[in-house]
Amino acid sequence: MSRIGIGIVGGGYMGKAHAVAMSAVGPVFDTALRPSLEVICTTTPEGAAEKARQFGFARATADWRELVADPRVDAVVIASPQHTHREIALAALAAGKHVFCEKPLGLGVAESSEMLAAAEASGCIHMTGFNYIRTPASQLARQILANGEIGAVTWFRAEHTEDFCADPAQPASWRTRGRANGNMGDLSPHIINAALAFMGPIASLCAEIETVHATRPSPAGPEAVTNDDQAQIMCRFASGAMGHLFISRVATGRKMGYAYELHGTRGAIRFDQEDQNALWLYKAEGPEGRRGFSRILTGPEHPDYKAFCLGPGHGTGYQDQIIIEARDFLAAISEGRPRWPSFADGHRVNQVIAAAWLSHERRGWVDVA
Amino acid sequence: MSRIGIGIVGGGYMGKAHAVAMSAVGPVFDTALRPSLEVICTTTPEGAAEKARQFGFARATADWRELVADPRVDAVVIASPQHTHREIALAALAAGKHVFCEKPLGLGVAESSEMLAAAEASGCIHMTGFNYIRTPASQLARQILANGEIGAVTWFRAEHTEDFCADPAQPASWRTRGRANGNMGDLSPHIINAALAFMGPIASLCAEIETVHATRPSPAGPEAVTNDDQAQIMCRFASGAMGHLFISRVATGRKMGYAYELHGTRGAIRFDQEDQNALWLYKAEGPEGRRGFSRILTGPEHPDYKAFCLGPGHGTGYQDQIIIEARDFLAAISEGRPRWPSFADGHRVNQVIAAAWLSHERRGWVDVA
Amino acid sequence: MSRIGIGIVGGGYMGKAHAVAMSAVGPVFDTALRPSLEVICTTTPEGAAEKARQFGFARATADWRELVADPRVDAVVIASPQHTHREIALAALAAGKHVFCEKPLGLGVAESSEMLAAAEASGCIHMTGFNYIRTPASQLARQILANGEIGAVTWFRAEHTEDFCADPAQPASWRTRGRANGNMGDLSPHIINAALAFMGPIASLCAEIETVHATRPSPAGPEAVTNDDQAQIMCRFASGAMGHLFISRVATGRKMGYAYELHGTRGAIRFDQEDQNALWLYKAEGPEGRRGFSRILTGPEHPDYKAFCLGPGHGTGYQDQIIIEARDFLAAISEGRPRWPSFADGHRVNQVIAAAWLSHERRGWVDVA
Amino acid sequence: MSRIGIGIVGGGYMGKAHAVAMSAVGPVFDTALRPSLEVICTTTPEGAAEKARQFGFARATADWRELVADPRVDAVVIASPQHTHREIALAALAAGKHVFCEKPLGLGVAESSEMLAAAEASGCIHMTGFNYIRTPASQLARQILANGEIGAVTWFRAEHTEDFCADPAQPASWRTRGRANGNMGDLSPHIINAALAFMGPIASLCAEIETVHATRPSPAGPEAVTNDDQAQIMCRFASGAMGHLFISRVATGRKMGYAYELHGTRGAIRFDQEDQNALWLYKAEGPEGRRGFSRILTGPEHPDYKAFCLGPGHGTGYQDQIIIEARDFLAAISEGRPRWPSFADGHRVNQVIAAAWLSHERRGWVDVA
C-alpha cells in the first residue's frame, strides 16, 4: 500500500466532495494507493487554511501554481470554476501530475482539445468528473445494455433538469452571466456524457437553446441574462437510434432530474436520479399478463455497491458517487492505464455541446464532429 | 326528456365503446336528450345483426348510406376506419345529421378541411373523438393551467407511447401498411390534441419520423413496412413556450403512455394515463423544505367525476371517457351549440401532422399553417 | 336473449351505480339475460319518480314491498341502508325473487344467518355486493395465488382506509351514530371479504376497536359518537398464515385505501385501490440482481378486462366493478347456479366482524365461528 | 481541533461502516474532535491486522481487552456480535472510555439495564447505534411531528421487513440459531426505536411471534430453527394513539423495508427506507381538490443534509447515516453531554422486545415496563 499525494484546487461544493472522497476511498475500496492530503488551494490564503483544517490537508495555498509545483503532490483534482480548468490542467500535466478535472473539461472544444492533447502527450492519467453516471443503478443500466438484455435500442430520451433558476424573480448572479455558467455550459455535460455512455457517438443533432427569462432583477434594475436557461436536442446516434435530450435549470419542481429511458427491441430501462437506488427494467419475455416494469433496488450484485454496504436496498448517495470516482482515479494511476471517462470523453461531450450551439444558430440539423 | 336516434358506423373496439356509452350516458349524467339506439353498421349484414343484438340496436346494416339515410337516426357516430370518415361524415351532414367522428378527422388536412367546411355549412353539431383528454385528471390539469396556478408555462413535453409493434418479429398486417395506419396517422392525433388543448397553437416545429423496422415477416417473406413506427417533434408554441412530442408504437413496456409534463413559472404538472386517476402537481410556494410533487387523486371536486362516483380515489376508467364524450355530444345537440373538440379541432390536429411530415421531409423547421 | 325484470331498492350512490350497471352490462358483456329496468324504490314517491326518470325505470315507488311484489320484477338489488337489508331480502326471497344485496349482509350475524338460511331455502340466486374485489387487478391477484405463483403465503396485511371522518371538527351525523354506520359496520366488510377471498377462513383473531374522536360538534353542543372510527385485527388464518387488518375512516390522506400485501415463499403481491389498474408482483426467481416488484398494468389477459377495452393500460374504474357484479348476478340467474360471493360469503364476513367485537370486548384472542 | 483516539471492536459489515465513518466525519461535518484510528479488534490477529491495514488503524488486536485498555483509545465503538456487547461495554466504561454500542444494547433487558447503570455511573458518553432513524427524511419526519404540522397522531404503523431468510430452502446458519439472532433480536430494535422516537413510550402491547420455517436444511438433515422469522405487535402508545409493528426476515421482495406511516388529525406522513431520500407528506389544508401526498425530496433545508451536498435531490445513502452517528458521538464527547439515542434509549427498546415476548407467551395484552 503506497501513499499518493493529492492536491485539490477548489474549496467549494465540489472541492469538499473530493476531499471527503479522498479521506474515505481507502477504507471503502481497500485501494492499493492511499491518498495523502497534501495541499488545498482556494481563492484566499485564509480560506485555504480554513479548508485545509476542515478537510485535513497538510498545506494550503491561494496559488494553484504552488499546489501544482508541490513535489509531494502526485495527483491534482481540479474542482475550480470552468474557466480555470485548462490552465491548471496544462500546468499540472506539464509537471507530470495525474489530473482529475471536474466536468466540463474547460470552456469548450478548443480548450478540451488542447487539454486532451496535453494529457495524451504527458503519459499521465487523466479523468473527467461525471459523477452521476457512477451510481450502481446507472452502472447496472450500462451492464444490462452491454449484455443485450433489452435488445437493440431504438429510442433514448434523457434529461437533466433542476429548478434553481425557475423563479423569474431570482436576481441576476454569476449563474446568469456568461455562456459557460449557463444551462448548456453547466448542466448539459452530465447528461450528454450519459447519452454517449449508453448509446455511443451522436452522429447528428438538431438543437434549440433558449433564455427563458431574458432579464433578472438586480440592484441597478433589470439585468440582461447572457446565457441560456433550457435547451432541447433531437439526435441520431451512430448506432441508428433516435434520441432526445432536454436540459433545464428552470424546470420547476425538479431537483435532480437526471433521468433517462431506453426502449429496446426486447426490453426497456427507466431511471431517475431523484430515486437513485432504483432502476426500472421491463423485459419483453414471459407471459404477456405478467409483464411490467420492475423496480430493481440496487444491491451487492450491482457494480460498486457492496463496498458501501452488503444489504440490498440500503442505498448509496451523492457522496458515494465521488468516492467511486476517486477509486477509479487511484486505480488508473496504480495500474498505469486510463479508466473511463478520460479527457477524451470530456472532449467528446464538448463536441456535442458545440454542435448543439451550431445547430441552434443555424436552426437545423448538423453533424457532430 | 327527449329521445335522440343514434346510428353508429363501426362495430369494432370503438364502435362498442360508443354503443356502451350511449346506453350508460343517460343514467350517469341525467342528460336532457336520451339516446335511442337505432342503427348499427358494420361490414357484413350478419356481423351487423350480431352487433345490433349485442349492443341493443333496433336495426342493422352493412351499408352506412342506409344508416345515414334512416329517418330515425338523428346523430351519427363514426367509428369506422379513417379512410371512411370523410365520405360518411359528408353524407351525414348533408342529410342534416349531427356527427361525432372518431379521431383522426379523415385521412389528412385535405379531408378534414372539407369535412370542417361541410360541418360548418350544415348547421349540425360536429365533434371529434379525443377520449384521453376527457379524464377528470386531464380536465383538472386544464383547469389548473387556466387558473394560472402554475404561472406561465415554459416547457411542455408529451408522449403517446405504446408497444403493440415493438417486437420486430411481429408479422406484417394492416397496421404496417399505409401512412394512415402508421404511428403518426393512428397514435399522434391524441397527443397533438392534448398539446393544443394545454398550450394553444403550435407556431413552428421540427420533426423526425421513422420506420424503425423496415420489414416485417409475412408468409411470402419479409414485407416492406410502408408507414412509420415512431416520431419526435420539437415545437414552439404561439405562446412562446418550447415543447417536445414523442409518439411511438414500438415503445417496449409502454401500454398507454399518454403522458405529459408542464413546467410553469410557479409550478409544474405531470400526468401519465397509465395511472389515469392521479395528477401530480408541484407548487412553488410555502417553505422550500415542504415542497414536492403532490399526487392528487381524482375526486368529486374535479370535472366530470362525481357523476361516476361520490368518493375520491374510487376512480374512473377508459369506458367512462367515452361516456363523457357522449354527454358532450348530446349536450351540444340539445343546446344547439358546439362543444370542444369540434371538427375545427380535429382539423387543427391534422394541420400539425401535415407540418410534421413536411418538416421531416425538408429536414428542418417549418411553420404550422 | 331474454329479458329479466330488475327492481332496485335505493336511489342514492349505490342505487345509481347499480342502475347504470344494469344499463351497460348487456352491451359490455353480451349477457344472455338482458335487464329490463322495471321499478326503483326510494324514500319518497317524488324522489322515486325522479330517479326512475333519470335512470330509465318503468315505474317508481316509495314502498319496497310494492317493488318486491311487482310481477315484472324478477330480481331485486338491495342498495338501501343496512338496517333494511334483512326485511327486504326475506320478502324478496319469499316472493321468489333473486336477490343481490349490497354489503354488509344485514346488521350482523343474526340477520345474515337468517338471510342466508332463507336464501338457501328459496332456491333463488343470492349475492352480496363486494365491488372492490372485482377489479381485474384483484382478480389477477387471486389467480396468481391460486396458481401457486408466489408459493405458500406466510403473511397477509390489508387495510381499508379513508379519511371522511378524519377532521375532528366534522359535525355529528348519521355516520357517527349507531354501530352499523361505524367503521367496522361500514368499511370493514370490504377488506374482510378480501382477506377471506385471498387467504381462506380466519381461525382466530385479536382486535382493537376505537372511537378516536369521542364527541363531534353539533348545533346542541358536543354530541357523543356512538360508533367506532378505526380498528385493527391481528389474525391467524386456517391456512396457518399470520395476518393483520386495519380499518379506518380517520386515515388522513387516504381516499380509497383498500390495499393489501401478501408475502409468499416464492413471491409477493402488493395492491392499492388508489392505483387500481396496477398489480405489483415480485417473483423470487431469476438472477438476484434482476429481481424487483413489477408494476403489471391490467390488460386483456386479465379477468373481466377485455370486455371494457382491448388495450392494456387503458384501465377500468369504479363503475366497471359494479358492471362486473351485474354480469355475475345475471349469469348466476341464467345458469341457475350461484356465483361468488353469495349470502354465505356475506355471512362469513359478518362472523369475522362479530368475532372482532368479541375480541375487543374481551381484550384478547378469540376463535372465529 | 483535538484528536480523539478511536477503537473499534468488530471488523465485519458494521465495523467497516464505523471505520469509514470515522475517516469521513471530520471533513464532512467539520467536527471539533477529530478521530484518530488507534486500534481495531477482530477475532484473529491476522484478520485484525488486515482490517487495520484496510481501514487505516494504527494497531490491531484479537483481544478486545487490549483495545479497551489501550491508553490512546478514548472512545470505543462496539460493532461485534450482540452477546459480546455487555462485557465489552462494561469494561470500556470501567476504563473511562466513551462507548458507542451498536443495536441491540446487549442480549436483553437484563444486560441493557446493567449497561445503562454502568454508563450512567461512569460519567462517560454512551450511545446506541440506530442508524436508519438518522436519514434526513426520518429526521424531517420527527421535525414535522414536533412542529405539530400533522396535528395529533391517531395511528402509527411501521415495519422492518427484509427477505434474507425468505427462501425455505436456505440452509440453517447462525442466523437461524439462538433468540438473539432471530427476527425480534436482530431486526426489531430499529423499528421499535423508530416507534419510540416518533410516538413516545408504548404503554401496552399484544404480540405474536413465529418461526415460519420450523426447520432448515443442513448437511446432517433438517435442523430445527431456534429463533423467530416474523412478528407483529399491536400497541397502544402512552399518548393514546394506536399502533402496529411488523417485523420480518421472510418478507419476500423486501430488501430494506423500514417503513412507517402516521395519521394525524391535520395530516399524514409516509416513508419507506427503500426510497430513503423522499418523505411523503399530506396536509389537510387548502382546497380539497388540490390535496394529495407530496413527495418531498431531501435537501439542504432538512436536518444533517447539507453537510453531504448542497443540492436538493442529490441524496444521501446508508454510509452517510453512520457518519451522522459518528458526528453525534463526537459532539456528545466534545460537549460533555449525551445525545440521543443513549443507552437509556437502547434499554427502552429492549423493554419493548421483552414485553413482546411476554405477550406472545401469554397470548394477550401486557403493559410495557
Image (cartoon, coloured by chain):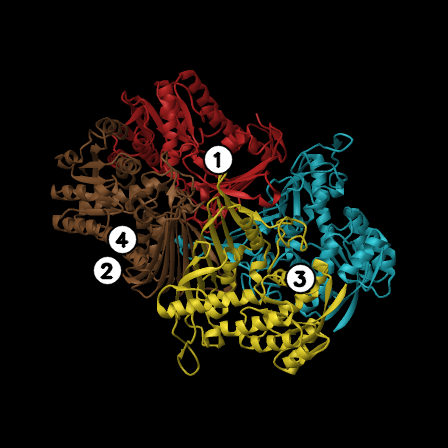
Chain colours: A yellow, B brown, C red, D cyan
Pointer 4 indicates a residue of which chain? Answer: B
In the rendered image, residues at marks 3 and 1 fall on the same chain: yes
Q: Quadrant of the C terminus of chain C?
A: top right
Residue on which disc 2 sits: B369
Residue on which disc 3 sits: A327
- Residue B270 appears in which quarter of the rendering? bottom left
- Tell me where residue B235 appears, x and y as whole percent: 34, 61
In the rendered image, residues at marks 4 and 3 fall on the same chain: no
The tag on residue A287 is 1
Q: Amino acid at mark 3?
A: Arg
- Tell me where residue B320 appears, x and y as whole percent: 33, 41
Callout 4 secondary element: helix
- Please give the name of the residue rendered at 29% of the width and 62% of the height, measured from the top-left corner: B366
Query: For mark 3, does the 10 Å Cα neighbourhood hold few (<14), some (14 to 19), or many (20 or more) residues?
Result: many
Q: Are marks 3 and 2 in contact (CB under 8 Å)?
A: no
Query: For mark 1, does the 10 Å Cα neighbourhood hold few (<14), some (14 to 19), or many (20 or more) residues?
Result: few
Q: Amino acid at mark 4?
A: Val
Answer yes or no: is residue C237 visible.
Answer: yes
Q: Amino acid at mark 1?
A: Pro
